[in-house]
Amino acid sequence: MAEDTSIFIGASRKPDDSYQRAEELLLRYGNRHGLITGATGTGKTVSLQVLAEGFSNAGVPVFCADIKGDLSGIAMMGEAKDFLVKRAEQVKLDPYRFQEFPVIFWDLFGEQGHPIRATISEMGPLLMSRLMNLTEAQEGVMNIAFRIADEEGLLLLDLKDLQSLLANIAERADELSARYGNVTKPSVGAIQRTLLVLESQGAANFFGEPALRIADLMRTTRDGRGAVSVLAADKLMMNPRLYATFLLWLMSELFEELPEVGDLDQPKLVFFFDEAHLLFEDAPKVLVDRVEQVVRLIRSKGVGVYFVTQNPLDIPEKVLAQLGNRVQHALRAYTPREQQAVRTAAETFRPNPDFDCATAITQLATGEALVSMLEDKGVPAMVQRTLIRPPSSRLGPITPDERRKIIAESPVAGQYDQVVDRESAFEMLQKKAKDAQEAEAQAQQQNSGGSRWTIPGFDDVLGSGNRRSSNRQTVAEAAIKSVVRSVGSSVGRAIVRGILGSLARGR
């Protein structure tokens, strides 16, 4: 049975299918990351639920996405159903206690949980380009936009801030091309059209303030259990690129904000990345390289990242090599790619002489998995054919009424409900444009000489209010160019950005 230093996962079986031993995840290696894989319907969600329960009971906060709604049951007390009780007996889980866990529900759309928001500036140019699927030329313009915003002190909080900045860049295209390289109006226009598509898909709900505070994902209860943050992702999965970009942003925020702590007795936070293949599909190499770098380095921040996906081939090899704790459910092997996936999964385990790993993967029953956790000195244990223990919380979704009650009683209730729209790039650029227009009107009035008298044929010399008397720069033109050079000069300093282009906040 699991002690305070480990999480009980299930029981391994001998070749004759009799009980062998308890399989556990050592908490001191919980930050060495992990992988849960398997075909649809083989038990991945239950394995995730069991691990989340174990981490929570150990006092480790958990963040996970609920793709189908099933994971929401972790918030309610489990029930003694026959097949669960039988499984508990098979893995020698005695006593089999039922529990409800401290859950905070989140939702990017604010419908099934507390709203989650991030600012455009926090997202950074790399992740925004990934979210919008921009071309290389368009990504270059996006980088220039963030550079200008940083240098000129323009806060990019929501979509309208970015839209107004892009409009400003289009007007200044010639000037900016001389400073930063080719900035074309067609590229800017293409980005603006993509922003409209994002807005229509509901992404506008995600960008803005109040932005999510990482501390709210790292809460513990008075009795010492870690809070389980569950992201409602059923609707979010209609826009998989937004889902993947959001989770990648969250991972990068954790990396940027948390201090170095080295190896602890247990993680400070465990992050489950469900449908992990979405993160890497069609991702540019620079992004994959940076994800690999974050996964490798975030371990020393006390954060464990667990990828959940159907196929181990979904994870790039460099990332796969960082994942020490592994739960492999059944895979089908009908197509050549599926057969390759089975071989790849089998080769990543430390072999067990009692069975052929590749054959076993195709024969595993629902709720059964090949398990290999890190043991003493961080060495992978020999792979074992394991029955996963039944969860202590409810198996299946909660009702809408139960969800509303939990949301109302949440420790963050009311903190994120109301949108805050403070002065940012949209308002600042509007104000600058208005000031420039007023300066131009004042200059035209001064050029008219303050008199209605004119001399026929001499308008070109004296000026009629509509014409200029010389080639010298008008006061209005000087004011406009001054505005262009010094927008936000009072805070005009470059903002330091982190490894994924998001803000590296001072700590």
Image (tube, grey):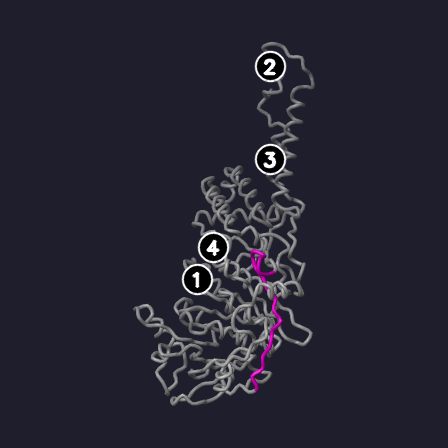
Decide which of 394, 132 is in the foreground and name it. Answer: 394
Eye-nearest disc, 1 or 2: 1
* Precedes in sequence: disc 2 or disc 3: 2
- Tell me the SS state at disc 1: helix
Please tell me the numbered disc located at residue 280: 1
Q: Find out whether residue 106 is within the magenta segment.
A: yes
- Residue at x 65%, y 20% (from the top left corner): 448
Kindly report the distance in space between the C-alpha atoms of the residues bearing marks 4 and 1.
Answer: 11 Å
Q: Confirm or deny contact between disc 3 and disc 1 (CB under 8 A).
A: no
- Drawn side of residue 11 relative to residue 215, left or right: left
For mark 3, does the 10 Å Cα neighbourhood hold few (<14), some (14 to 19), or many (20 or more) residues? Answer: few
Give the image location of residue 347, x and y in percent: 37, 77
For mark 1, does the 10 Å Cα neighbourhood hold few (<14), some (14 to 19), or many (20 or more) residues? Answer: some
Give the residue type that dot 1 points to. Phe
* Precedes in sequence: disc 1 or disc 2: 1
Give the image location of residue 15, x and y in percent: 38, 88
Q: Which residue is mark 2?
A: 459
Q: Which residues are magenta?
A: 95-113
Please tell me the numbered disc located at residue 130: 4
- Quadrant of the drawing holding the N terminus: bottom right
For mark 2, does the 10 Å Cα neighbourhood hold few (<14), some (14 to 19), or many (20 or more) residues? Answer: some
Q: From what the image shows, is residue 210 above or below residue 81?
A: above
